Amino acid sequence: MRLEFAQIHDLRQVQKLAPQLIHSIEILQLPVLELQDRVQQELEENPTLERIEEQDERAEAPEEGSAEAAKEEEPVAEATETPERSAEEFESTFEELESRQAEWDDYFNQFSVSRISGEKDKKLEAMQNTAAKPITLQDHLLDQFNLLEMPPRVRTVGENLIYNIDRNGRLQFSLEEIVQSIGSSVTAEDARDALELIQSLDPPGVGARTTEECLLLQLKTVEGDYEFLKELILHHLEDIKKNRLPQIARKTGRTLEEVKEAIEILSKLNPFPGAAFSTERAQFIIPDVIVEEIDGEYMLTLEESFIPHLRISNHYKSIVRDKSNDVEARKYIDKKIKAAKWLIDSIVQRQQTLYNVASELVNSQKAFLDHGLSHLRPLKMQDVADKLGIHVSTVSRAIAEKYMQTPRGIFPMKFFFSGAVKTQDGDESRVRVKQRVQEVIESEDRANPLSDDEIADKMKAQGIDIARRTVTKYRKALGIASSRQRREY
């Protein structure tokens, strides 16, 4: 076998995404708040970008034929060592920048929510709408614990115990482990005393080590047969979970009615008492698209108030035009100006694409907007892509993580795309079929609930041919228990 090196010419066509196209795709996928962050980052990193303030938008443009207007129309050359030879090459770039600024203004005005004169200061409004720092479970417990009188050693171990209580209100480690971690300054007796004090605090059940202990601590706060409730907690929680009420009645010697009444009391107890003090903040949804019904017609606007209106700085454009400035500085600024132009173009393209896709969704799902969920029609992304003459991946990116506010509520834009299920009357959306499964279950006899097979048979009688496993999947997605657990005795 002979090994050798050789140069081989291979001519082929390879499709690559231009940097501008990659940039546009990234901007298209961003929901409005992430786009706001991205624009803010670009404003900080690119000095040629400027935010247009409201007073700037109202300012008068230079009169046609004036010296200022003539200066703006002057072509700008690329900063090179031979600017005379490259002036014509880059003249079109800056003429395009000047002419398209008006287009960008039109785009933002076309798709933005109309501004009302005298609206509140944006920063003040943002501060007023900012959620306050939530009170943690540990803060809540320490405020109560510090009001109690106790020996210093008990206080020391008690504070340690509080910081070892998890978000659900459970003590994460055994008393022995906590005492050992503190050292010889406290004893197991100190730990037991401290835990007893903590378990007397609000919320009831906090500081428990098991579900059973948590529920037992809360029995003091409810009325009922304490001993019977205690017996159910200690020995019959699994039977209660699986709805084995006759079996509980036989084992305890109680009537079925007494068992049901006791379980009703237990259902009011909270196995996770610390959950109300979760430090996780609620996720606020800002819809990218707003649909309003006006005089029987649905009007669509894009949420643009969070997106700064941008332009390219005239100051930096004049620096590049001035051939007396440093060549390298002019090259650097020219590069930044092009990057700014790509960003503005990408935002405009995002707004245009999102508006077109949202408009098609409103047109396709008008029956849903008029009458509700029962009229949501099957719709595929390919259908919208074909009508708009764009690729299906563009539709997918345009709706990614974006929400639409409608008279029916706020929905993820992907909600309006639903696969079809064959029925006798034609195709029906899976969302609607799932709703009909729920309606069948809600109308069943609670003493004799329907199995998934029986639900499938009832759906077939209504002209919807779905398998039992599909019914099971929809039932679980709706958070509905099995027929055994739904039975009422």
Image: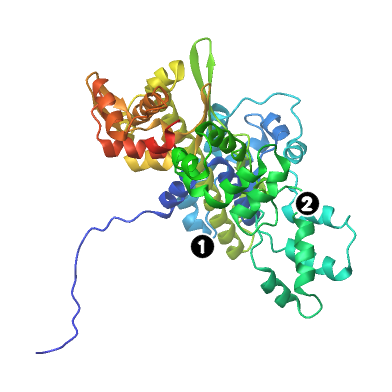
**Secondary structure of residue under mark 2:** loop
Residue carrying label 2: 201
Name the foreground residue: 102 vs 64.
102
Q: Position of residue 278 (x, y in %)?
A: 66, 49
Residue carrying label 1: 82
Q: Looking at the image, is 337 positioned above or below residue 356?
A: below
Q: CA distance from mark 2 to mark 1?
A: 81 Å
Few, some or many residues within 10 Å of mark 1 (<14, 14–19, 20+): few
Q: Are marks 2 and 1 in contact (CB under 8 Å)?
A: no
Task: Look at discs 2 and 1 and give the one toward the viewer.
Answer: 2
Q: Position of residue 396 (x, y in %)?
A: 38, 41
- What amino acid is at disc 1? Thr
Q: Is residue 186 left or right of residue 326?
A: right
Q: Which residue is located at x 88 percent, y 63 percent?
A: 150
Q: Which residue is located at x 56 percent, y 40 percent?
A: 32
Q: Does residue 390 show up?
A: no
- What amino acid is at disc 2? Leu
Quarter containing the C terminus: top left
Quadrant of the image occupied by residue 264: top right
Decide which of tag 2 and tag 1 comes sooner along the chain: 1
Q: Looking at the image, is 79 positioned above or below residue 315?
A: below
